[in-house]
Image: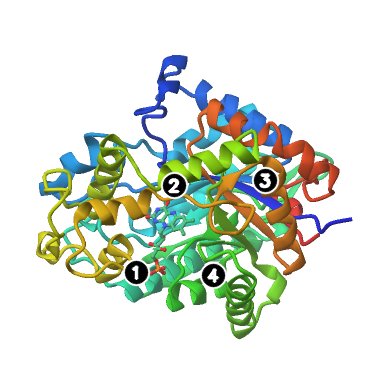
Amino acid sequence: MSRQQHFGWFLARGFGPHGWGHPYLDWNYRWTSPELYQDSVRTLEQAGFDLLIIEDAPSLGSPTTIDLRVRQAFGGPKLDPLLLAPYLFAATQHLGIAPTVNPAAYLPYTAARQFATLQHLSGHRLALNVVTDTGSARHFSAAPQLGHDAAYDRAEEWLGGVRDLWRSWPEEALIADPARGRYADGSRLAHTQHRGEYFDFDGPLNAIPFTDGEPVVVSPGGSGRGLGFAGANSDVQLALAPMNEASVRAYRARIRDAAIAAGRQPEDVTVLFAIQPVLVSSAEEADRLVAASHSPSDEKLAVIAEKQSSDLETDLTALDLDAPLDITVFGDHVSHGSIRRLVGDHGPDAPLRTILAGHARLGRLADGTGWVGTAGELADRIEEYGTWGNDGVLLWGDLHPVTVHRTLDELVPILRRRGILRSEYAGSLRANLRPF
Ligand SMILES: Cc1cc2nc3c(=O)[nH]c(=O)nc-3n(C[C@H](O)[C@H](O)[C@H](O)COP(=O)(O)O)c2cc1C
């Protein structure tokens, strides 16, 4: 029997215009109405997934480049995933839901109370994808934007405060015994008082204790500071890394070391590696798709240029495809890492066409060069990850029912037959995430 693993789904473009730019817009779902997402989460639960993570960024980005983000809906608009969560809980019984939250956007007391409410309403299935995006700072206060590490420091203080508030109600404070005529014992509540670098507030929280543990904390940061945050605070880490044995083992070792350094157990953090498969019905079709990707059409390059323009907040669509990319177009607002990711191994004389074509290029699942293949080939890869001690994977895409079915219809039966995917759920998300 193969090793059982955890499965998550990452709604990568957030609670935004689903289907835009794809023919499946003609399915006539409205992206602002809950049915689109409810359909999909029912399918994820039927499939045996542990949780859905919903990407978010509260901001449309810098005022001068907003049009780049919204004109093809690559970076916005987005509605708040925290408020979508109750609709998804109502449509499911077991699936965990992880809206993305930014500590800049919620005072700790508000956060602790809202998340406690959702944890109770959902039967203890709430998770929080805690991110440290600093670009949205101007929407929340006039204070100067924090640097990378300081944003993690603030997130740590915020989460510690939220957890103190949750814990301000010990289990024995809730009596709820009609025979004694007592609902609660206020003398047992902790008089939380937080005076920190970023937040000051008092407790106790106006809530009740959890019966099946606190909301699950998810984190995606991959820098040294990000991994340190995960080791000290997270129940689930979303990992982006090359999927070969050495890199998967190394990433897991860093997270496990960070957990030990923070006084936790290495298995306290479940690591889910993000993957983005393109599933087709036969090996021949996969070969054809990969071969075609080596000579992309101008239309395909234009879509890639639009996406990159949105991500990098720099208009690449107006540039000459056949001239070398002049990197001064990026000004100071784009990080060197992001430019490197765009340009790859190409030299300074490489035309933009060549650079974008590199992003169009696909590879085969079967030989480990990419993500195009059959459901059986993907199952083989996932099974192999299990032999490296892997906890699970995070499938990356939108959450349109068309995408979910296209990805899972053949894959789920194969994974289940091999014993890689669960057939039954435990009582809470925390229980479902326990190591197999
Ligand atoms: C799988 C995954 C999901 C992410 N989701 C979000 C998100 O929803 N919102 C966000 O602002 N950043 C998101 N990020 C970005 C991270 O929060 C973080 O900003 C980025 O990884 C850089 O942090 P680092 O320097 O610690 O690696 C995500 C990253 C990954 C790999």
**Label 1 vs 4, first from the N-terminus:** 1
Residue at image mark 4: 230
Asked where in the image residue 70 lies, by quadrant, the reply is top left
Q: Nearer the viewer, residue 154 or 421?
A: 421
Q: Nearer the viewer, mark 3 or mark 2?
A: 2
Asked where in the image residue 302 lies, by quadrant, the reply is top left
| Label of residue 55 in the image | 2
SS for callout 2: loop
SS for callout 1: helix
Q: Nearer the viewer, residue 415 or 93?
A: 415
Tell me which image quadrant ligand 1 sits in.
Answer: bottom left
Pinpoint residue 39: horizontal percent, then vertical percent.
59, 24
SS for callout 3: loop
Residue at image mark 1: 151
Q: Nearer the viewer, residue 6 or 347?
A: 347
- Residue at the location (56% across, 75% down)? 232
Residue at image mark 3: 124
| Quarter of the rendering occupied by the N terminus | bottom right
